[in-house]
Structures are given as structure tokens and as C-alpha cells.
Amino acid sequence: MSNRETKTDVILIGAGIMSATLGTLLKELVPDWVITVFEKLENAGEESSNEWNNAGTGHAALCELNYTVEKPDGSIDISKAININEQFQLSMQFWSYLVNSNLIRNPQDFIMPLPHMSMVQGEQNVTFLKKRYEAMSNNSLFQGMEFSDDPVKLMEWIPLIIQDRPSNEPIAATKIDSGTDVNFGALTRILFDHLKSNNVDIKYKHSVDNIKRTSDGSWELKVRNDRGNIEHHTAKFVFIGGGGGSLHLLQKSGIPEGKHFGGFPVSGIFMVCNNPDVVAQHHAKVYGKAKVGAPPMSVPHLDTRFIDNKKSLLFGPFAGFSPKFLKTGSMFDLVTSVKSDNIVTMLSAGAKNMSLTKYLIEQVMLSKEKRMEELREFIPTAKSDDWDLVVAGQRVQVIKDTEAGGKGTLQFGTEVISAADGSIAALLGASPGASTAVHVMLEIINKCFPQHMIDWEPKIKEMIPSYGVPLMENPELLHEIHTSTAETLGLSKKELVYS
């Protein structure tokens, strides 16, 4: 049993895409800072960032219908889509900087060009999609989007979905070729390899048991390795980026900003196609509409994926319920997250979301054949033998009290919580998470290191040219960035052959 104490400048908890991004940004801004990372698993990117646990959509709001809402007057509000697209552009610029700086050698190891599509059925939904297309295609961020309700054109775009489909129901789709498939697991591993070569101490199989304030304002972490040895580490700044595991550590920190937060775990199951002939017939990410009563994270989508140098086809997600906050978590995670300060919030959320709980339990009980029936709404000819089930990662949705929703409101998205003095920050929540990692980490840098921002801003602008500038209002800069990032990341219009 060791009780040695180590001092460091920055501690990152969790070796996922968020810590990888923050660590890489800080190493570029202040190369001499000492950074230590603690990860309870054996490798980086094994939980929510892993390619099999993450949809990899490269969320730029090109195809996700839940980011565009129809208002009571019938018009379409695309403000959330604009916001998410602008955030994704920051990630693209930062990744391009890393490629240009030779910190990433081959961008095709983690990002591939892939059309993003939205597809709907039924007259009412077709009308909605057309209005959404008109609102978005007039915006410079979504240039190049196409709409079609012509069966011949749709057959050209999505043959697997259209062939042998009964022709009595109206169907329409939008398509935009500037979409991507991102392997966030591979990107996380690439960034951690880079950090390791830059003297960042990455301690795998190390769990953070406790976190407390010291008399000088630093943070002391009690860390246990896989042999049961205890170490104590102190740092001036701590980032809690442990996915679903972040809530418990935030609660242990005792900061007032972390009170009244709860978490609601949702698990996911995808179906993966094991027939290469079927995989070869589809080349896009196609998002549909969530069923009435289903949560936004259950929007059905049929995705081409590039994993382990191989083209795959995934359909899902089917939601499920497990009280674990991480795939490798404990069955007691949900129960132990209930504290005196958040019990009312949690109970209120439970009462408000009975229908969601019922929906999740129903999803857990689905047989493979029932899942195949849902898949056949996308692929009428789908055969059970061609598809296997894959259990995806756990997502912990944030529960908090809000003015709009009152006590115990379930939030969909990511949430940054930081201490007033900026000495500790935690990230809670889920999608669009990984895709907006650069935006979220810049937000943390701004909040937690305000005293350095004047010195750091020139370097941030070198890495991310549009930093602080709304791209939508600067079409020339947007065009320049679109062109340069596409070229640097190998996303320009060219045929990439993948087996």
C-alpha cells in the first residue's frame, strides 16, 4: 500500500475524446505544463468514445431532424442546427491544424467523407422535410443540400432502402455530400499517443476514488491502481471527463455548482450487418424521425461506418435501460448518485418521465424479430440472418432544475459544470458530445483560465481560424474554411475505395 503524493499542473480524469482534446489543446498552448491522466480501463477511448459505442456521425446537424423544430406557425426553427454546425466546424479546423502540424499523419485513420441524409415517410412528414430543406438550403452553412421525393432519384441515392418498397406511401429525403463518418475511438487513441510522446503521464488501470480541496486551493485525488495500491495526486486544475462516471466524482468534489444535478442512464443496442453484399449497397448515414413518445437519442438511423479499415453497416439505436452509468460500471451507479441535494430533482424527473421509463423497458424486452420489423421500415428486404446485435455505450442524460422545465428536467446534450474559481470542471451529458469536443473544451479553457486568455488567443486562432467569429455571418471565411479543411482531411470529392 503506497501513500506517495505527486504534484502536477493539470489532471485529466478519463481517457476519452474530451480529455484527449483538452490535453492536446493545453499542450499546444503551454507545452511546459505537467499533465497527468487517469483512466480506469486498460486503453484510451474504450467507453463512450469507442467506435462501437458511438454513432460516429460527425454531428454537424445536416441530417438530425430533432435539431430542427417546427414552430406553432408552421415555420422551421433551425437555430439549434446552426449552433451545432458551427461547433463542428471548430473540430474540423482543429483536426486540420493537427494534420498540418504532422501531429496526425493520416486523417483517413479517423475521418471519411460520407453523405448525410434525412428520410421521412407520410404526407405530413414529407411537407415538414421540404420546409426544413428550404430553411436550411438558404443558409450558407448547409450549402449543397438537395431534396427529392422522386422515387427514381431516391433509388439512385439509397437503393437498399427504396428497392421492393410498397409505392403507396409518400417518401422524401434530403442529401448533403459534405457529411462525415468519424471514428472517435481511433481519434482518441491517436491523440493520446501524441500526448504520451509529449511527456504526458497516462496512467491506465487507475481509478479515482475521491477528490477533495486542499488548504491552498489545489485538489487532492485519491487514486487506486489495479493492484489496490493507493496514491495521492494534487493539481491546480482538474478536469472530470469520465463520461457517465463524471457525476459521482463531481459530487465528491463538493463544489456548490455541482449540486442539484442528477443522471439518467440510457443504454443502446445497434444491429450490424454481416453480409458484405448488403453493406456494398448503401453509402450514407440516413436519419429518420423518432417514433412518437421516443426520446431524441432513439432517432433511427442506417449508417455506413468505416471501422478497422472495413466498411460496415449499422442500424439503431434501440434504447434500453441499465442502472449502470458506464458500460463497465456498477449496477449501483444510479442508486448511489442520489444525494440529499438532488433527491427532489431525481424524484421529480422520475414522476415526469414515467412514459420514457415505460418506453425503455419495452425496448429492453424487444425480441430480435421485433427489432428486425423496425429495421424493415428502412430496408424492406432485410433478412434476420444478415444482422447481429451489438451493445453500444451507456449515455447518462443530465437531470437538473430549469426555469423552463421546472424541477427534475431531463436534458439532451452536454453540460459543463465548473467551480467559480475555475480550478475544477466536469462534463456531463451525451450527444452531440464527441463531435463538439473542441467547442466544449474551448469553453472550459475560457471559463477556467481567464487570466491566460490574452496570451493564448493568438495561438488558439492559429489552430482554429474562426475562433470567436460566427461563420454564418462570414460566408467568405466559411467558404475558405470548408475548402481548406476538406482538402487537409482528405474529404474533397474523390472516390475513396474501402473494402
Image (tube, helix red, strand yellow):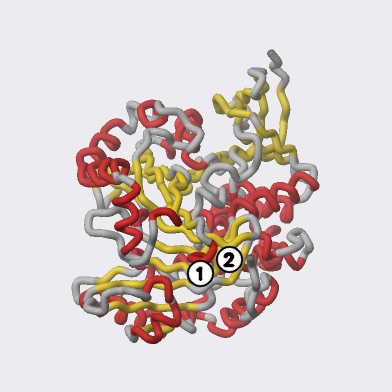
**376 or 386: nearer the viewer:** 386
Q: Is 241 placed left or right of 295 in the picture?
A: right
**According to the image, label 1 marks what residue?**
86
Q: Amino acid at mark 1?
A: Glu
Q: Quadrant of the N terminus?
A: top right
Q: Is 321 placed left or right of 237 in the picture?
A: left
Write the residue at 35% across / 37% down: 260
- Quadrant position of residue 384: bottom left
User: Which circle marks residue 72 in the picture?
Assistant: none
Residue 255, position in %: x, y?
Answer: 47, 34
**414 or 315: nearer the viewer:** 315
Q: Is residue 148 above or below residue 262?
A: below
Label 2 to label 1, Cα distance in Å? 7 Å
Residue 398, position in %: x, y?
Answer: 38, 44
Write the residue at 48% across / 28% down: 252
Can residue 230 be seen here?
yes
Q: Is 340 placed left or right of 48 in the picture?
A: left
Q: Quadrant of the C terminus?
A: bottom right
Q: How many marks?
A: 2
Element at label 1: helix
Q: Amino acid at mark 2?
A: Leu
How would you rate the neighbour count of disc 2 (Cα within 10 Å): few for under 14, some for 14-19, many for 20 or more? many
**473 or 70: nearer the viewer:** 70
Write the residue at 61% across / 24% down: 222
Residue 5, position in %: x, y?
Answer: 71, 23
Can residue 77 be seen here?
no
User: Which circle marks residue 90 in the picture?
Assistant: 2
Q: Are marks 2 and 1 in contact (CB under 8 Å)?
A: yes
Element at label 2: helix
